[in-house]
Amino acid sequence: MATIIFYEKPGCQTNGRQKKILSDSGHTLIVRDLLSEPWSFETLLPFLEKLPVSQWFNRASPRVKSGEISPETLDARQSMEYLLSDHLLIRRPLIECMGKKLAGFEMDEISRLTGLSARIHDEDVTDFSGCAQE
């Protein structure tokens, strides 16, 4: 089994379910607070660079939901400025495992990265889009 660094928003119920799936599958989790991590362009970009820029954002964040920030209208530089100034905007969780980095909890990617079994109990794991409360 793998050791996974899991950057979460503390108290997020969705992140809690994600961690349970990983730990129940035998993986060791090192949990870190995404909000207090001292992110820089160099440390954050490797988690996001494989995604389209608009997918760098947590769609459940209040600033995105309200329309204050429209990720589809931003370029990479503008997006990174927002993400570094407000960590609630960062798509989560951020996951580091075996030298690879991911943003979000996409089951196919997680399975490829960790060898996570397709059988994940009887839980509905299809919607990890955000926390019940931001």
Image (cartoon, grey):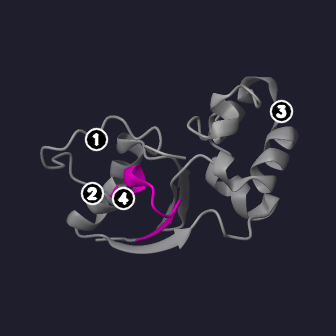
Residue under the point 60% across and 41% down:
58
Upstream in sequence: badge 4 or badge 3? 4
Report, in whole angstroms, how far the alpha carbon at label 3 lies from the one at label 2.
Answer: 34 Å
Residue under the point 74% across and 70% down:
38
Upstream in sequence: badge 3 or badge 2? 2
| Dots 4, 1 in contact, CB < 8 A | no
Residue 62 place in picture, x, y as percent = 64, 38
Residue under the point 27% across and 55% down:
116
Residue type, numbered disc 2: Ile
Report, in whole angstroms, how far the alpha carbon at label 4 lies from the one at label 3.
Answer: 31 Å
Residue 110 place in picture, x, y as percent = 38, 50
Say which residue label 1 marks.
125
Upstream in sequence: badge 4 or badge 2? 4
| Dots 4, 2 in contact, CB < 8 A | no
Pick out the residue farthest to the left: 122
Disc 2 secondary structure class = helix
| Dots 1, 2 in contact, CB < 8 A | yes
Residue type, numbered disc 3: Asp
Report, in whole angstroms, how far the alpha carbon at label 1 lies from the one at label 2.
Answer: 9 Å
Report, in whole angstroms, how far the alpha carbon at label 4 lies from the one at label 1.
Answer: 12 Å
**Crowd band around label 4 with a 10 angstrom C-alpha radius: few (<14), some (14–19), many (20+):** some
**Crowd band around label 2 with a 10 angstrom C-alpha radius: few (<14), some (14–19), many (20+):** some
Q: Is residue 39 left or right of residue 116?
A: right
Q: Is residue 31 left or right of residue 67?
A: left
Residue type, numbered disc 1: Val
Magenta highlight on residue 71: no
Residue 75's mark?
Answer: 3
| Dots 1, 3 in contact, CB < 8 A | no
Residue type, numbered disc 4: Gly
Say which residue label 4 marks.
16
Residue 21's mark?
Answer: 2
Quarter of the figure with the N terminus: bottom left
